[in-house]
Amino acid sequence: MNPKLHTALRILFALFLIVSGAKHLYTVYWGDPTIMATGYPEAGAEAFVLAVLATKFLLPMICTTKLIAGVLMLLPKREPLGVLVAFPYSVGMLAWGVFMVPSHLLIMGGIFALNALLVYANWSAYKAVVGA
């Protein structure tokens, strides 16, 4: 992958993770978290988000993980770890788009595709782990 493109994608994805994670954490602790459950045209999506919010720990854990992944991606020599930490989140977003909110599939697919591209770009760092 072109190094300039790789750097641009890494910074873009890291900033997305940091900004969205911080925004959602702010909304959960100091705002009205039920606002996150509104605006979905699909039946059941609002109930699902409200159920996630009712756990009181799941959304903060996801947002904290996003923050950690984003920061790791911006630190020197920590990008491969940050990309792996963010991967379960991006798989979850893809599943959210496929199974719960197809109207958001393009956005969620984009999040997954960006993370998958960064996994591909860092594949040499993962070779020892997967035995390739």
Image (cartoon, rainbow, N blue to C red):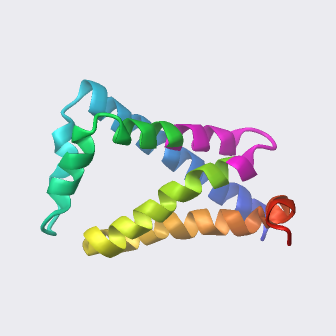
Query: Is 51 displayed left or right of 77 in the figure?
Result: left
116 up-or-down from 46: above or below: below
Task: Tell me what residue is drawn at x 59 percent, y 62 percent.
Answer: 115
Task: Tell me what residue is drawn at x 83 percent, y 58 percent.
Answer: 125
- Give the image location of residue 76, x and y in percent: 79, 40
- Give the image location of residue 54, x and y in percent: 21, 39
- Give the image location of residue 37, x and y in percent: 18, 50
Residue 39 visible? The answer is: no
- Give the image location of residue 84, x and y in percent: 65, 54
Q: Give the magenta-colored segment's residue range.
A: 66-81
130 up-or-down from 64: above or below: below
Q: Residue furthest top?
A: 30
Picture quarter containing residue 73?
Answer: top right
Magenta residue check for 50: no
On the rendered image, what quadrant is the C terminus found in? Answer: bottom right
Task: Tell me what residue is drawn at x 67 percent, y 40 percent.
Answer: 72
Looking at the image, which is closer to me, 84 or 30? 84
| Numbered disc total | 0
| Predominant secondary structure, magenta span | helix
On the rendered image, what quadrant is the N terminus found in? Answer: bottom right
Residue 102 visible? The answer is: yes
